[in-house]
Amino acid sequence: MNLFSLNYMDFEIKAKLKSSRARAGIITVPHGKIHTPYFIPVATSATVRALDQEDMNSLGAEVLLANTYHLHLKPGDKIIKKLGGLHKFMNWNRPLFTDSGGFQAFSLGYGMEHSINKLGTIFPEKKKAAEKQPKIAEINDDGVTFNDPSSGKLVHLNPKKSMQIQQNLGADIILAFDECTSPLSSYEYTKKAMERTHKWAKESLHHHKKSLIARKNKYKDKYGNQSLYGIVQGGAYKDLRIKSAKFISSLNFDGIAIGGSLGKSKEDMHRILSWVIQLLPENKPRHLLGIGEIEDIFKCVEKGIDTFDCVMPTRIGRRGSLFISPKSHGNLKNKFRINIKNLKYKLDRKPIDKNCECLACRKYSRAYMNHLYKSQELAYYKLASLHNLNFMLRLMEKIRDSICKSYFNELKNEWLKKY
Ligand SMILES: [Zn+2]
């Protein structure tokens, strides 16, 4: 059987800039089209926190990313399969991504051990507490075994299991199982983890192809047909990143994701992306895992990234940070945010952002949002999440337009100008 015939994704590049690697295109999967560059909202447990799929439709979201780890534990991927798969379960008829579950599983190990996040920010207050706890993830070539912190249940994940879970969920685009290392991991450990990731990449592909062949013989509908992305690892080490980019590119994946530690600063991250992206095939979509700050979006699009996912817009929104554009005095210094809990907004009759057409900006003032936040009203979480996501999705529309009509550099300079 010709495995190449089992290709359920189409990626068409519509426009490319001459001055950089920025490109605009369309990914087509069974549930629809994704216009790239795209920011994918994260629906961790089959919903974007504080919102539902009607809200996501109202924002015109083209695709969501759900977390395999969370759905495997609750309500369980087998239950979701019984209920007709993730699209049906959450009533979302557009494209879906799921991640491999690896990032959360490994974060339990290294995040607890090193008390850090993806870009290496160290939380000293958490470090002390974490040191007292037993290490909860055990990693070897067979996969990762960990205690689910909420239920205490022992869970084992490996490439086969991750593929099975993601098949049960049935997203259009799924991710290979990889080992995500900490920014504080040594060269030797990062190398070992990268080699493991490469072995797991081949195993993930093998189990994915097997299930596609089985499906093809059993079902006629196109909706369960999935595409698989490989993940480039290698931490912040140049030779490892280059090796990983070459190896993952050589396999028959439908798209390529860049994962793992991206160094200890934004400069590190951009350096790593420059090493990696030039080695990736032009004709496959490239996804950057877990990055979503506005400055990073512009710079990573410029480097040739097609899709992003990040919980940041909704997470910071719930904590009071709401996005503003340059026309509402958003800039690099304030990270395009206002802090709505600030006293100065108590009597502010203006909308959050004067150019935003989301429900919160059309109907309510900053003063009202300040009040809702301070009163911890549930409506605040919904309105703040709607605003921040609308802001990101509209920004991406503008970025796509700017690539197609060749004014990306002007748009980037307008947003990222020094003051
Ligand atoms: Zn708004």
Image (cartoon, grey):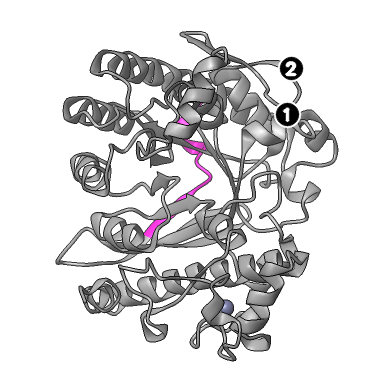
Locate residue 297, reporting x and y percent.
35, 60
Is 51 above or below relative to 236? below
First to last magenta residue range: 1-12
Secondary structure beneath label 1:
helix
* Residue that label 1 marks: 73
Q: Is residue 83 left or right of residue 241?
A: right
Tell me the tag on residue 153.
2
Between disc 1 and disc 2, the foreground one is: 2
Locate residue 322, reporting x and y percent.
52, 70
Q: Residue at the spot x=33%, y=30% of the render?
A: 183
Q: CA distance from mark 1 to mark 2?
A: 9 Å
- The amino acid beneath tag 1 is Leu
- The amino acid beneath tag 2 is Lys
Locate residue 230, reporting x and y percent.
42, 33
Any part of residue 2 in sight: no
Q: Residue at the spot x=28%, y=55% of the render?
A: 304
Q: Nearer the viewer, residue 305 or 378?
A: 378
- Tell me which numbered mark, 1 or 2, is placed earlier along the sequence: 1
Q: Nearer the viewer, residue 243 or 267?
A: 267
Locate residue 67, reporting x and y percent.
62, 39
Q: Residue at the spot x=38%, y=76% of the render?
A: 330
Q: Is residue 182 left or right of residue 348?
A: left
Where residue 215 sits, quadrant-wise, is top right
Residue 8: say if magenta.
Answer: yes
Q: Residue furthest front?
A: 343
